[in-house]
Image (cartoon, helix red, strand yellow):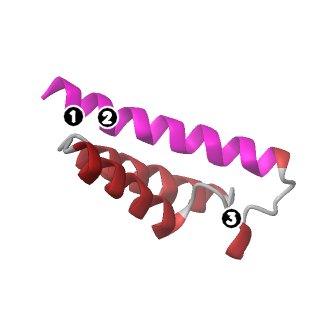
Amino acid sequence: MFEMIFYGVGFFVITIIFQWLLHKVRKNHNQGDSAIWVGTGAVIVISIFGIVTSNVNYFAAVLGFILGDEVGKRAGWQ
């Protein structure tokens, strides 16, 4: 159970940090087709890693990512 919470919170924090850094580095161009670490594409990649490694904790990671992605959208970082 701790491991699932760790994955969820970890991906939430990582997502917020990456989106903020990309917002600063790319000067507000982390949008549209060239966006990095946002949206459904990243969810698919995280899900595939979970399936390939047979690790159920990646479902918590997907939830953490989705929450972090929504926070990034509301903050205007993507």
| Marks 3 & 1, CB-CB < 8 Å contact | no
Left or right of 60? Residue 26 is right
Location of residue 16 in the rendering, given as x and y in whole percent from the top left corner: 56, 43
User: Which residue sits at x=42%, y=39%?
Assistant: 11
Label 2 and label 3: CA atoms lie apart by 23 Å
Q: Residue at x 63, y 55 (%)?
A: 75
Marks 1 and 2, how far apart in space? 5 Å
The magenta stretch is: 1-24
Contact, CB < 8 Å: mark 1 with mark 2? yes
Secondary structure character of the magenta stretch overall:
helix
- Check whether the beta carbons of the residues at disc 2 and disc 3 lie within 8 A of each other: no
From mark 3 to mark 1, how far is it between C-alphas?
A: 27 Å
Q: Nearer the viewer, residue 20 or 44?
A: 44
User: To which residue does mark 3 refer?
Assistant: 35
Secondary structure at badge 1 equals: helix
Q: Residue furthest top?
A: 2
**Along the polypeptide, which appears first: circle 3 or circle 1?**
1
What residue sits right under mark 1 in the picture?
4
Residue lying at 82% horizontally and 59% vertically, measured from the top left: 28
Query: Which residue was labeled with disc 2?
Result: 7
Residue at the image position 25 percent from the left and 53 percent from the top: 51
Precedes in sequence: disc 2 or disc 3: 2
User: Where residue 58 sits: x, y (%)?
Assistant: 28, 45
Tag 3 secondary structure:
loop
Using the image, tell me which numbered label, if any, was put on residue 46.
none
Q: Position of residue 42 (x, y in %)?
A: 49, 59
